[in-house]
Image (tube, rainbow, N blue to C red):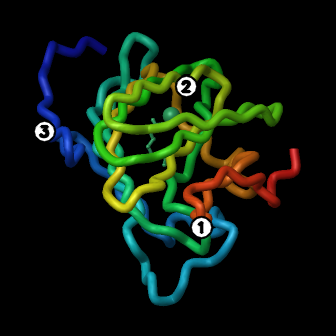
Amino acid sequence: DAVAPFNVLMELDKGVLEPTDHTKRRHLSDMHGMYLEEPDEAAGDALVYTVHEIVVPESPDHIQCSTTILQPGRVGREFFMTKGHFHEVRGRSEVYLGLRGEGRLVMATEGGDHAVEHIVPGSVSYVPGGWAHRSVNIGSELLVFFAAYVGDAGHDYATIEDEGLPVLLTDAPDGPRVERNPRYTQ
Ligand code: PA5
Ligand code: NI
């Protein structure tokens, strides 16, 4: 899996990569059941986030890189967020670099420990192996960040799909609030 050196140019405030090998978009319908409440009819099938990926071989010799653009919005009291996942290979770590907007990175182990870090322009968050991670846009503009992780990590979405993580980020009168997730039973 030899790969020749290459460059990609990122529009820092938009997260667009040029060239982009692969783009995926997640809408409300892709996240059915992940928010405590069902989205309003009026929200339609809104775009929640876009991921631009640089595709390299899925091997530990390589580093997968991508940008995520998370739209501002809420479902009920919860802010728009990514699906979130463990890495399939549990020990694989990841680094997030904040580029724009204001967010939170919610992380949790299978044992139920959790951590919440800030994503702001310039934040570098280290996600150790064994920690599920989900990003949340708590602001009123786009949240943009870059992520890099070990090539063979893979994504396990299923483990947190039904119950989510131990805490939720909600829009409270006094600002964003970290609340216990009533659906989390572990
Ligand atoms: O590698 C990561 O953790 C990120 O690039 C995410 O994949 C991205 O933010 C989208 O989130 P998810 O994969 O949970 O849908
Ligand atoms: Ni990841």
Coordinates of residue 68 in the picture (x, y in percent): 35, 45
In this rendering, the label closer to the viewer, 2 or 3: 2
Kindly report the distance in space between the C-alpha atoms of the residues bearing marks 2 and 3: 27 Å
**Residue at position x 29%, y 37% in the image:** 99
**Residue at position x 55%, y 58% in the image:** 175
Which residue matches tag 1?
173
Which residue matches tag 3?
19
Q: Indicate which disc residue 102 carries.
A: none
Which of marks 3 and 2 precedes in the sequence? 3
Sort mark 1 into few (<14), some (14-19) or many (20+) by Cα contacts within 10 Å: few
Which of marks 2 and 1 precedes in the sequence? 2
Return the residue nearer the eye: 147 or 24: 147
Cβ–Cβ under 8 Å for marks 2 and 3? no
Coordinates of residue 50 in the picture (x, y in percent): 34, 54
Q: Quadrant of residue 155?
A: top right
Which of marks 3 and 1 precedes in the sequence? 3
Sort mark 3 into few (<14), some (14-19) or many (20+) by Cα contacts within 10 Å: few
Mark 2 within 8 Å of ligand 2, using the beta carbon: yes
Q: Is residue 57 above or below residue 31?
A: above
Kindly report the distance in space between the C-alpha atoms of the residues bearing marks 1 and 3: 42 Å
Coordinates of residue 41 in the picture (x, y in percent): 51, 89
Q: Looking at the image, which residue sits at the far right? A: 185
Kindly report the distance in space between the C-alpha atoms of the residues bearing marks 1 and 2: 30 Å
Q: Amino acid at mark 1?
A: Pro
Cβ–Cβ under 8 Å for marks 1 and 3? no
Q: Looking at the image, which residue sits at the far front? A: 174
In the displayed structure image, the side of residue 182 where residue 55 appears, left or right: left
Coordinates of residue 144 in the picture (x, y in percent): 32, 45
Mark 3 within 8 Å of ligand 1, using the beta carbon: no
Q: Indicate which disc residue 127 carries.
A: 2
Whether residue 51 is visible, yes or no, is no
